Image (tube, rainbow, N blue to C red):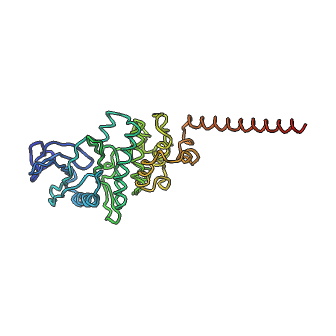
Amino acid sequence: MTATELQPGTNLDQFKIIKAIGHGAYSDVFMAEDPSGRRVVLKCPHESIMGDVSTFDRFRRELEIARHLDHPGIQRPIEFTENRSRPYMVMEYVEGETLRSLLDREKRLPIDRAVDFGCQLASAMAHAHERGVVHRDLKPENVLVTPEGRLVVTDFGVAFMAGARRLTWRWFSNALGTPDYMSPEQIQGKRGDARTDVYAIGVMLYAMLAGRVPWEGDNALAVMSQHISSPVPPLHEFNKDVPPPIDGIVRKCLRRAPDERYEDAKSLESDLRHWRDLPLSQFIFGDEVVVATSGNSDLRLVLLIFAISAAFLSASILLIVIAYLIGHAQ
């Protein structure tokens, strides 16, 4: 049975198709029911790549990677068919909408909600990173939001796991989709590591707080060029309510050099959960990662006024002391 024949009411083996819920770069996704009436998700490769000898291996590899993960923020795999003419995966069904549809509707999220979402994403990826798995395609389209506000990361189709055999990804550029969330090292054709996922989380945090991604352009090449060479537009320009520590955290995620980002999602999660306890000096007197040296003009003005006032006060006190000493000397 081809994907075009998988219509509501038809069956794929023992699963009854309810509706199509997604169309990716190399697969179609359907909501279905198993014989017990339980809802599941079926992921089927496109007909156009069914003849590719590696399709079956890729699906099996994706499932095996997912089976190494056990976290409430990561979609759970159920089974994989051994039918090489029509391989498909069965995943848990998660009620809700994608983060993309949520952002399209609400544009910008409240600070606390955005930070909570960032914590959830970082927690899920920290779990994956501890098991040697890097997602490499984190973006709002691959994140589900339940009615209760729980985030669930999906689609490990281009993920890799430490020690796993590396497969050639002939449709790699299409599989990664939009360049908005790609790290500079991915754009340069490198494999990436945990810090690649950190970068993508940083872009999503920026989008949740600013109502837009950091870099926009008329085409993919223009956006990718900005990821590699353009400074991060200050969050404060789009949302003046963003606290300096949150701004600093996002900027650290978006550093072009991987070595200058958080080393993994666990470190990012820790800072997001405790941002109110972080010393403000960490975001004022550091390098370009910080808020004050990256375009936050209001904060720099406050610091300049404070420094001038302190200098004037010190000079005034000194003059008073000198006048007092001269008067008593006479």
Can you tell which quarter of the image residue 191 is in? bottom left
Residue at 42%, 36% in the rendered image: 210
Image location of residue 43, percent across then percent down: 20, 51
User: Does residue 47 appear in this view?
Assistant: no
Q: Residue furthest toward the right? A: 330
Q: Nearer the viewer, residue 178 or 222?
A: 178
Label total for image: 0
Residue 181, above or below 68: above
Q: Which of 237 and 328 is in front in this view?
A: 328
Would residue 238 be found to the left or right of residue 101 on screen? right
Image location of residue 298, percent across then percent down: 56, 34
Q: Quadrant of the C terminus?
A: top right
Image location of residue 285, percent across then percent down: 59, 46
Residue at 19%, 49% in the rendered image: 41
Q: Which of 51 and 10 is in front in this view?
A: 10
Can you tell which quarter of the image residue 83 is in? bottom left
Image location of residue 135, percent across then percent down: 34, 54
Residue 95, above or below 125: above
Residue at 37%, 36% in the rendered image: 109
Would residue 240 be found to the left or right of residue 55 on screen? right
User: Does residue 128 appear in this view?
Assistant: yes
Would residue 257 be found to the left or right of residue 130 on screen? right
Q: Residue furthest toward the front? A: 328
Q: Which of 87 and 188 is in front in this view?
A: 87
